[in-house]
Image: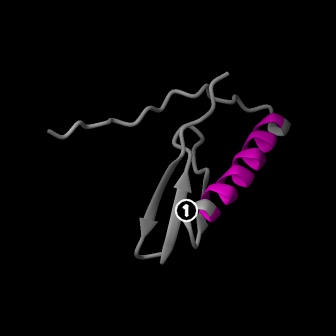
Amino acid sequence: MKDYHINIFYSEENEGYIADIPDLKFCSAWGATPEAALGEVMIAKAAWLEAATVEGKPIPQPKYRPIIYQVG
């Protein structure tokens, strides 16, 4: 299985970085640095997958792919 895409972006409102996994609904985390946000979202991903498994809910296959624009 391919792994899930992770978005990381700076949030002025939260004064830090947000990491989210679009294929896993509501799976996101915050960190003071991009690396911290990534570490936290990996913990959130593990918890999300464990909870879905325990509850017998379907685990989506990775599908999200960002749009990449070429400049020039």
Q: Where residue 12 appears, x then y in whole percent?
A: 40, 75
> Judging from the image, what secondary structure is the residue with disc 1 in?
helix
| Membership of 41 in magenta stretch | yes
Q: Quadrant of residue 46?
A: top right
What residue is drawn where x is 55% and y is 56%? 19
The residue carrying mark 1 is: 34
Q: 56 or 67, which lies in front?
A: 67
Q: Which quarter of the image is occupied by the C terminus?
A: top left
Give the magenta range: 36-53
| Membership of 69 in magenta stretch | no
Residue lying at the far right of the rendered structure: 54
Residue lying at the far front of the rendered structure: 72
Q: 52 or 40, which lies in front?
A: 40
Q: Is residue 48 above or below residue 19?
A: above
Q: Is residue 46 left or right of residue 71?
A: right
Q: Is residue 53 above or below residue 46?
A: above
Q: Where residue 5 appears, x then y in whole percent?
A: 54, 38
What residue is drawn where x is 39% and y is 37%? 66
Q: Quadrant of residue 2?
A: top right
